[in-house]
Amino acid sequence: MTEKREKEPLFYIQQPNFQIPENRMQTIYSSRKAEQERKQKQNLLDLAGTKEEQKGPKEKIENTAGQMEVQEAIEEFESGREEKKGASFAFTTEKRKPAFNRVKSFKEMDTLERLDYLIDFPKQLPPIPCIFETGEKAIRGFLVSKNEEWIEIKLFDESIERLKLQSLNAVKMIGLRR
């Protein structure tokens, strides 16, 4: 008969002591306004230091008194800022400009803007099928190229047709049909 191996218990009564990680919340924030204030403070201190180097010993003593006044003003400003921080949120809800400029929708564009949009369409994406309307006919296909006088349209049967830019009345997207 084979030897029986001693199996480890399936349920441990004595649990190991896990160390629970310390939760660290955000304690410091930065904003443009705070960054500008910090730079202004640094510039004031730098200016005071360069003026002190250029002056004699009598003026250095007077300048030290001026530095004390500046330092007191900075501390007063900082303490006022901390009081404001407690009363309101760290970030103010001031009206900001949007990060991106709004782009016209295809329907809002005129014919030349639509052609430029189709020419500059990203090459990674499949081309957009469109209807190119003239006074006589409507052509379905993809815009291939455009110059000052002509546009070239690749039809669905792989042939290419040229149209005069002046004869073009409208450009409409067909889109993908299901």
Image (tube, helix red, strand yellow):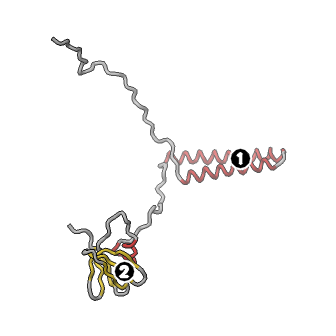
Residue 48 at what x, y percent from top left?
73, 49
Residue 58 at what x, y percent from top left?
84, 45
* Residue on which disc 2 sits: 151
Of residues 144 and 52, the one drawn nearer to the viewer in this rendering: 144
Residue 93 at what x, y percent from top left?
46, 56
Residue 178 at what x, y percent from top left?
20, 66
Q: Residues within 10 Å of mark 1 (few under 14, many from 20)?
A: few
Residue at horizontal 39%, vertical 78%? Answer: 146
Q: Is residue 69 left or right of residue 160?
A: right
Quarter where residue 32 is shown: bottom right
Q: Amino acid at mark 2?
A: Ile
Of residues 88 and 97, the one drawn nearer to the viewer in this rendering: 97
* Residue on which disc 1 sits: 69
Of residues 106 and 141, the one drawn nearer to the viewer in this rendering: 141
Q: Is residue 166 above or below residue 39?
A: below
Q: Is residue 147 above or below residue 103?
A: below
Residue at horizontal 82%, vertical 49%? Answer: 55
- Labelled disc at residue 19: none
Q: How far is mark 1 from mark 2, CA to CA? A: 73 Å
